Amino acid sequence: MTKYIFTTGGVISSLGKGIASASIGKILESRGLKVALMKLDPYINVDPGKMNPYQHGEVYVTEDGAETDLDLGHYERFTNTETTKFSNATTGQVYNTVIARERRGDYLGKTIQVIPHITNEIKDRIRKAAHASKAEVMIVEVGGTVGDIESLPFLEAARQFRLEVGYRNALYVHLTLVPYLRCAEEIKTKPTQHSVGKLREIGIQPDILICRTEKALSEDVKDKISLFCNVSKGAVIEARDAESIYQIPLVFREQGLDKIILNHFGLKCRSGDLKDWGERVVERVLRPRHKVTVAVVGIYLGLQDASKSIYESLVHAGMCNDAKVVIKKVDSEDIEKHGAAGLLSDVAGVLVPGGFGYRGIEGKVAAIRYARENKIPFLGLCLGMQCAVVEFARNACGLKGANSTEFNKNTKYPIISLLEEQKDVKNMGGTMRLGAYPCRVKKGSLAYRTYKRSMISERHRHRYEFNNIYRDLLEKKGIIFSGVYPKKGLVEIIEIKKHPYFIAVQFHPEFKSKPDRPHPLFREFIKSALDRERKIKK
Ligand code: GLN
């Protein structure tokens, strides 16, 4: 029988519920359990695919091609679980399903209500996710903050869940903030009391509290939280601000969070430890011997982390190269205004990430030209590859004005364009090339030396493709098409000759990098950037 853990958050948003949930997954995995994680998102959008990444953060793409919340990226980076389309459910999806059923007449004219129809659909989705993953422990992260109107149906479904599966088979973990008031020099528990109070109003008594705090929690503070929140003292877990998110599983483990959970579920597991994680991940991320600065050239709007997985992949690549990777975020519109040289002369590598729309494109193209001509290690991802091809066509092949038809429909040289079969697609949601596709890697190429394999599989999220009409011409001028999707002959990887590291890919390798298994493309990019840094210093 699957056991269920629900993680909720109180007091404020951005407490790191995703990382806490992923860390719980990690410590349970270390005890030999098969875990799976899912996220319930209270917003009404049907999926994050069409949400603005500069507001909402990155769209994380699963193997099976679902466009999901960025927390799923944390789940995959911390644990061995593979997320799928079942791992994310939004209010929009839930209502969509229920309303479609109503339209079909499936409810036989009954009045459709939040309870039970919406809550039943939410519970169904949780069960489906558990079933599909065959997990022993299913961790369900409830998005939003307790007290939000939007979260109520999800919390109600979580409350009902325990009734169905039995007390011992469901567990509620609440993440809360315990602020330190500098002027009073005091840690305050009242916000936690209130947010637990709010949860209890809806019928959920948390079993475990994870307290985000700047300062250590004294025994007195823990006693107080325990008494007022009705949670046993041992289950009041301190989560002090850490230097690296990858320390969190160790922090939980030290306080016996795994034992508390296993006891509640009555599970007997192997003892297990996180020694490997501690040595191979945490030690390396905290104490690197070298340092290297690379530029990520994108459009930087708002605060949200639109390139979360890319930044994490760079951290991972740093770890295996024993280096701290300093990321210089360069706004491609600044490059358009001031030129590439001034903004990129101090970096040892240039990365151009994915994106949509014309804004900042010319700056990205200029950055790539600068990296190509000055032999600076370059990694292009998705739109980054498309810009690399445009740059090469324009500046190395004399195809003046070459472009992607995404940016100029009437370009004389549509070097990136839609496939014929895509041209009638009108609906913007979920109509891209999404999810995992196989790619054949050319022997002897940089890609082959990097992956050390001739067949790979990577995740996609894009509409436009390299236009094969231009293949011969570009090849003659020095581009190597080193990766192709065999079934359709679509270009997946390009590289250029006589350059220390210049590679660009149509897919998104960042979704598959893990701290203990860095992605080879990022690993070699940072390695090459370090070589350059050393040479410059000499
Ligand atoms: N806008 C480009 C396309 O649709 C690239 C997408 C991306 O970088 N994810 O093909």
Image (tube, rainbow, N blue to C red):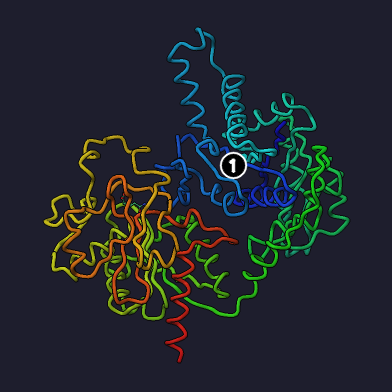
> Which residue in the rendered view is the most extreme toward the top?
108
The relative height of residue 373 versus residue 463 in the rendered view (above or below) is below
The quarter of the rendered structure image containing the N terminus is top right
Residue 156: x and y in percent read 66, 28
Q: Establish whether ligand 1 lies closer than 8 Å to the Cβ of label 1.
A: no
Q: Residue at x 37, y 38 (%)?
A: 430
The quarter of the rendered structure image containing the C terminus is bottom left
Residue 30: x and y in percent read 72, 52
Q: Residue at x 40, y 61 (%)?
A: 300
Q: Secondary structure at mark 1?
A: loop
Give the crowd class for mark 1: few <14, some 14-19, many >=20 residues within 10 Å: many
Q: Amino acid at mark 1?
A: Gly
The residue that label 1 is drawn on is 144
Q: Residue at x 48, y 45 (%)?
A: 62
Residue 281: x and y in percent read 64, 65
The reply, left or right, for residue 379 in relation to residue 422 is right
The reply, left or right, for residue 414 in relation to residue 343 is left
Q: Residue at x 57, y 37 (%)?
A: 40
Q: Quadrant of residue 117?
A: top right
> Which residue in the rendered view is the most extreme toward the bottom?
538
* Residue placed most toward the observer, 62 or 162: 62
Q: Quadrant of residue 145?
A: top right
Report the number of discs: 1
Residue 140: x and y in percent read 64, 39
> Which residue in the rendered view is the most extreme toward the left?
412
The reply, left or right, for residue 168 in relation to residue 122 is right
* Residue placed most toward the observer, 176 or 362: 362
* Residue placed most toward the observer, 235 or 469: 469
The relative height of residue 152 versus residue 305 in the rendered view (above or below) is above
